């Protein structure tokens, strides 16, 4: 009983996969041609009532292929086999119908298609032993000999299998594109939106801990940060929906930390050299960390590379500044060095993790998902880069090498 249920469930799944509008049209047109030929044969006296009834039963099996493709293919093949072995007079379009069944079966399941093809061809050979000819399309085309029929059956079989392979390839590509959009959206949310929100939380937490009321200028700055987070949220939505993914990708990675920059300014900065991009991110990152009570600096060296802005470099720097703000001890400071070479960017970040449970600190779990650096390690490995983290004498150090493409 369980096997029957599983078989029925499997057939239903295949039916849902195969069924579409083109199949409905093809099947109904073929059934209509068979019916018209049968009615014409009755009116002209060329077909007996018994042959006409068997032909209409065959038409019912053909129509079933539009709604239950697997069951319809099997019944059409069985009906064709019976009609051939019984030497019944059949409409010429019955050959088209069984060929269509072979093609549909090839799309649905190769083993089923091979079985239907073998049985249908064997039945045709037995029923047409004299090989005097087979009619096709209202008798306007006569097929003589064995090879044309074999070619037709194999052609429809291979056509159905090829259509299935093409569909699977398209589905795999669509799944890959969808997965890439999801990964991109998750990375953007983590690198930009979550870091902005974490910065807001840390600023408010510091003001509360120090007992300071935020000034009007500070509130304006935090409002700008919140507005940037909202704008990047809209960009992430565009990436998820597949709209302006390339533009959103570059915009979200370049110079987005400069308070007061208009969207027009951001778009212009997307074409800036890599060194200018790094300096912009570093200036904003250092300023934000100072406002949170950190002592430290970013040291940038430039070998005069001609590389354009890099989403990977920008994203990693943003992630590092966010990590320092969320996990490092402000009293111990930080140092970050960015070496922009002709072939790669080398980043080293050193800080001291803060003690867990420090009074006035937000819980790290509330500020970070803890997946950002692991994500960048995978991305760098895919591009032959390196990301290494080590702890020594209570100091946390990250070193990364990001390959560049110059022009």
Image: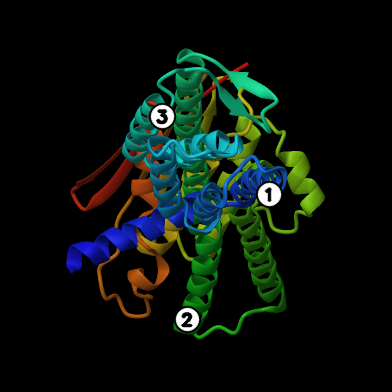
Q: Residues within 10 Å of mark 2 (few under 14, many from 20)?
A: few
Report, in whole angstroms, how far the alpha carbon at label 2 lies from the one at label 3.
Answer: 97 Å
Residue found at x 72% / y 34%: 271
Report, in whole angstroms, how far the alpha carbon at label 1 lies from the one at label 3.
Answer: 23 Å
- The one nearer the camera, 348 or 249, is 249
Report, in whole angstroms, how far the alpha carbon at label 1 lies from the one at label 2.
Answer: 94 Å
Disc 2 secondary structure class: helix
The scheme the figure's colours follow is rainbow
Q: Quadrant of the C terminus?
A: top right
Q: Which residue is mark 3?
A: 127
Q: Is residue 25 left or right of residue 14?
A: right
Disc 3 secondary structure class: helix
Residue 278 picture location, percent across and down: 58, 38
Q: Which residue is mark 1?
A: 39
Q: Residues within 10 Å of mark 1 (few under 14, many from 20)?
A: some
Residue found at x 49% / y 38%: 98
Contact? badges 1 and 2 (CB < 8 Å): no
Contact? badges 1 and 3 (CB < 8 Å): no
- The one nearer the camera, 398 or 195, is 195
Residue 200 picture location, percent across and down: 55, 71
Q: Which residue is mark 2?
A: 210
Q: Earlier in the sequence, mark 2 or mark 3?
A: 3
Quarter of the rendering containing residue 77: top left
Residue found at x 76% / y 44%: 267
């Amino acid at each position: 009983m369980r096997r029957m249920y599983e078989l029925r469930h499997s057939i239903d799944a295949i039916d849902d996969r195969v069924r579409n509008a083109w199949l409905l049209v093809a099947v109904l047109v073929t059934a209509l041609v068979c019916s018209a030929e049968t009615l014409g044969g009755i009116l002209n006296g060329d077909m007996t009532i018994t042959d006409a009834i068997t032909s209409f039963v065959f038409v019912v099996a053909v129509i079933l292929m539009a709604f239950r493709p697997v069951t319809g293919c099997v019944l059409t093949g069985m009906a064709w086999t019976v009609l051939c072995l019984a030497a019944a007079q059949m409409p010429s379009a019955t050959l088209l119908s069984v060929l269509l069944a072979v093609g549909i079966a090839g799309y649905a399941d190769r083993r089923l298609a091979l079985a239907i093809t073998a049985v249908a061809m064997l039945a045709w050979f037995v029923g047409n032993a004299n090989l005097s000819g087979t009619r096709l399309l209202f008798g306007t085309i006569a097929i003589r000999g064995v090879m044309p029929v074999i070619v037709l059956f194999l052609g429809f079989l291979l056509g159905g299998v090829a259509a299935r392979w093409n569909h699977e390839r398209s589905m795999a590509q669509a799944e890959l594109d969808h997965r890439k959009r999801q990964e991109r959206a998750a990375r953007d949310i983590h690198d930009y939106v979550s870091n902005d929100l974490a910065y807001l939380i840390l600023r408010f937490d510091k003001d509360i801990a120090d007992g300071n009321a935020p000034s009007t200028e500070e509130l304006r700055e935090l409002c700008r940060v919140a507005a940037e987070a909202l704008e990047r949220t809209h960009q992430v939505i565009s990436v998820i929906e597949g709209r302006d993914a390339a533009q959103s990708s570059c915009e979200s990675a370049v110079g987005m930390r400069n308070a007061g920059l208009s969207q027009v300014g951001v778009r212009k900065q997307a074409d800036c050299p890599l060194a200018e991009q790094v300096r912009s991110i570093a200036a904003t990152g250092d300023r934000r960390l100072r406002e949170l009570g950190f002592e430290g600096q970013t040291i940038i060296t430039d070998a005069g590379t001609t590389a354009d802005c890099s989403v990977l470099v920008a994203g990693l720097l943003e992630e590092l500044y966010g990590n320092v703000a969320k996990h490092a001890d402000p009293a111990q400071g930080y140092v970050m060095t960015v070496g922009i070479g002709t072939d790669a960017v080398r980043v080293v970040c050193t800080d001291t993790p803060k003690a867990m449970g420090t009074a006035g600190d937000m819980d790290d779990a509330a500020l970070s998902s803890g997946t950002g650096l692991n994500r960048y390690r995978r991305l760098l490995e895919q591009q032959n880069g390196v990301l290494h983290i080590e702890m020594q004498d209570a100091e946390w150090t990250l070193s990364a090498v990001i390959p560049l493409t110059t022009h």
